Image (cartoon, rainbow, N blue to C red):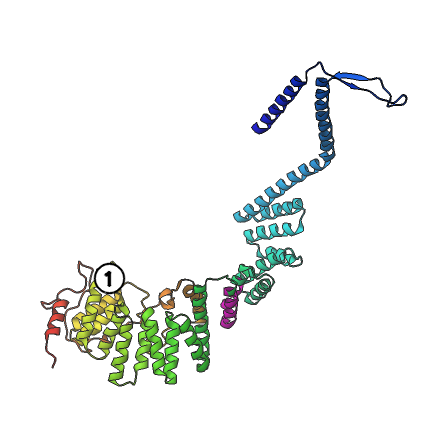
Amino acid sequence: MTKYLIAILAFIAVLAGVLLWVGDDIMLSIASTATSGPLSFAPIEMSWQFAILLGVFGTLALIGLWSAFLWLWRLPRRVRSGVGLRRRNRALDAMEEALLAGAEGDVSKARKKAEKARALIGSTELGRIVSALSAEACGDSEEAVGHYEAMLENEKTRATGQRGLAQHKLATGDLAGAIEQSRQAYIANPNAKWAFETLFKAEVANHDWLAAEESLDTGESRKHVDKNVARRRRAVLNTAEADRLHDAGDNTLALELAVKAASLAPEFAPAVALAAKLYNQSGEIKLGAKLVEKSWALAPHPALSLAFIDLLDGEDDRTREKRMSSLVKANPDHRETKIMLAEDYLRKEDAVQAWAILSPLLRSETKEDIGPSARLCVLAAQAEGRLNNPTDARLWMQRAATAPREADWSDLDPEGESFDYSPQDWRRLVFSFGDTGELIHPRFDARAPLRLPGVAEIVDPEPQEEAPIEPIIDTEDPILEPVEGKDLAERLDSLLDKPKS
């Protein structure tokens, strides 16, 4: 506003200067040479000041008349625009009220406001979208599906209708319908990330692992999924298909897919364990051992130690020790490595060395709030049983029964499947491991009882009669109270000092 005022004042100042410079003593005379007709008039005389002012104000008058003409010319359109703007604002208000009513669950109000918005908008396509959204918010899926199906008839709203239908069908379990709609949308629009995500989820839910892998490849090439996430998801999909083929008896292709999965994600224990099992069945022990060692260096897992032990079955002592040493060197300081060594010593009846490894683990985990896991308590009981300390073995078993539940895979069955996943478990694993790198533990999630060895497996089956032992209650150092004048550390030291016979 200020700049316009300055311009006007500047113009007035210039005009005043011109008028002052011209003065009122110089006259302007206008005459016509015509002797007759409309162009014949008597000479007109005026001062130059008057002529300048007349020219300025005449120009301003013409500008004013032209502006008035334009205003009158545009008046009907402005009236129509004002009415349209008010109509548009009313339509927006109706849309807002329809969606809010839907969110509140007021079905009748949502439907009424959606109808009003559709009438005010004057656009069939936009009206259908508003009606579908309000119906979804109300939970009226049948009406929403009707609107989405109607959207498929128009090119402008086809993608919106496909998205709504695909997501509805996925949510209601119509996997074939969800796959069809999302695949059509993804082909029509390669940039539709929602189509990739819906298609992939539907194929995984349908347990179609190979089709899901193809969609994953396409999504990765179009940058709709992170490379690391795609790599881990692909590893799970290949392992799931390998597991299915293994159950069907096609071990050759199953081994190929399991090895592929293990190479994609060496940290994925289910793939490595399955590949090692299939390598073992085909007699390729060295290849299986190398695969386990590579995975152990990245992410040790109890199932891998069981798979490795199976690979060593039938080997001579020298070869067995050499391969076990190689596995330990892959990740010597990891907790699982120490537990694996303790279990190996227990299998070899060397309870002293087993206890030497277990004792530091028990003490370090006792200092934590949760205390040692049931798995460690059972191993301690086994060690005590082999050290001819049945009383302490029973105490450790009592503690194992009340130890906090942890997903530490302590319930693995050495004679069974390490990862006995159902198709639904593989489905969950695609996203849990694929997106976060986390393994699921279905038995732990379902709060199924942990498989713990019985007391008869650990202690002398015919112990002498003695007074009942109360379960251990947490104390300042809840490992074990002194037994027969010696605590566990003292007994360990005395055992280690004994010369071997």
Q: Amino acid at mark 1?
A: Gly
Q: Which residues are magenta?
A: 198-220
Quadrant of image for the C terminus: bottom left
Rate crowding at label 1 as few (under 14), some (14 to 19) or many (20 or more) other CA atoms within 10 Å.
some
Residue 420 picture location, percent across and down: 39, 73
Q: Residue at x 55, y 49 (%)?
A: 102
Residue 481 picture location, percent across and down: 15, 64
Q: Residue at x 68, y 16 (%)?
A: 23
Relative side of 273 to 163, left or right: left
Q: Residue at x 80, y 17 (%)?
A: 44
Return the residue nearer the eye: 343 or 312: 312
Return the residue nearer the eye: 313 or 333: 333
Return the residue nearer the eye: 22 or 116: 22
| Residue 105 higher or lower than 454, as above or below | above
Query: Is residue 200 rendered magenta in the image?
Result: yes
Quadrant of image for the N terminus: top right
Give the farthest residue toward the left.
485
Q: Secondary structure at mark 1?
A: loop
Give the farthest residue toward the top.
25
Residue position for label 1: 371
Is residue 375 visible from the viewing direction of this image?
A: yes
